[in-house]
Image (cartoon, grey):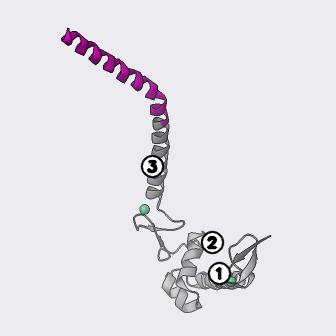
């Protein structure tokens, strides 16, 4: 069993699956139910409207959205892409940014692989250098004579 400090209230608790103490977890569930039932009747509400009507802090509502617990059909309930600020429904990035990020990850991997290959090629370069050096010496010794 792992003991952690609750990030909400600072109390020590036995960590199970969620990083919140039982009291805060219960409170969060209450928040979630409030938001959920409010949205059933007011589908087009914005985050601030929900917060005002239910007393649930806006950042809680947003965290529900980010976690994918709240998926609203309302166009008012949106998150912002953390990269470009475009409105999104779920998660942290819009589709575009997600694919850009994924391909840049792949590019990094390719770059690392290329660097590994370049590393393997290094002895050859060394050999080339030493050949050049020898040729230079050869020329020098010839010009001397
Ligand atoms: Zn707590
Ligand atoms: Zn984006």
Circle 1 residues within 10 Å: few <14, some 14–19, many ≥20? some
**Bounds of the magenta segment:** 116-145
> Which image quadrant for residue 12?
bottom right
Outermost residue on the right side: it is 1
Circle 2 residues within 10 Å: few <14, some 14–19, many ≥20? some
* Image spot of residue 70 (x, y percent): 60, 73
**Residue 104 circle label:** 3
Depth check: give the residue in front, 125 or 100: 125
Q: Which residue is mark 2?
A: 69
For mark 3, give the secondary structure: helix
Mark 3 lies within 8 Å of ligand 2 (Cβ measured): no
How far is the residue under mark 3 from the one under mark 2?
A: 29 Å
Which of disc 2 and disc 3 is earlier in sequence? Answer: 2
Residue 51 appears left or right of 2: left
- Displayed-image quarter of ligand 1: bottom right
Depth check: give the residue in front, 25 or 50: 25
Residue 9 appears left or right of 92: right
């Amino acid at each position: 069993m792992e003991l952690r400090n609750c990030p909400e209230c600072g109390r020590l608790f036995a960590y199970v699956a969620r990083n919140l103490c039982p009291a805060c977890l219960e409170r969060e569930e209450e928040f979630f139910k409030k938001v959920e039932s409010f949205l059933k009747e007011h589908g087009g509400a914005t985050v601030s409207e929900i917060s005002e009507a239910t007393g649930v802090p806006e950042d809680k509502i947003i965290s529900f959205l980010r976690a994918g617990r709240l998926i609203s059909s309302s166009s008012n309930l949106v998150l912002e892409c953390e990269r470009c600020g475009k409105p999104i429904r779920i998660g942290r990035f819009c589709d575009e940014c997600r694919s850009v990020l994924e391909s840049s990850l792949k590019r990094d991997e390719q770059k690392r692989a290329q660097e590994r290959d370049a590393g393997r090629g290094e002895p050859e370069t060394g050999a080339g250098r030493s050949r050049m050096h020898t040729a230079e010496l050869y020329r020098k010794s010839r010009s001397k004579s």
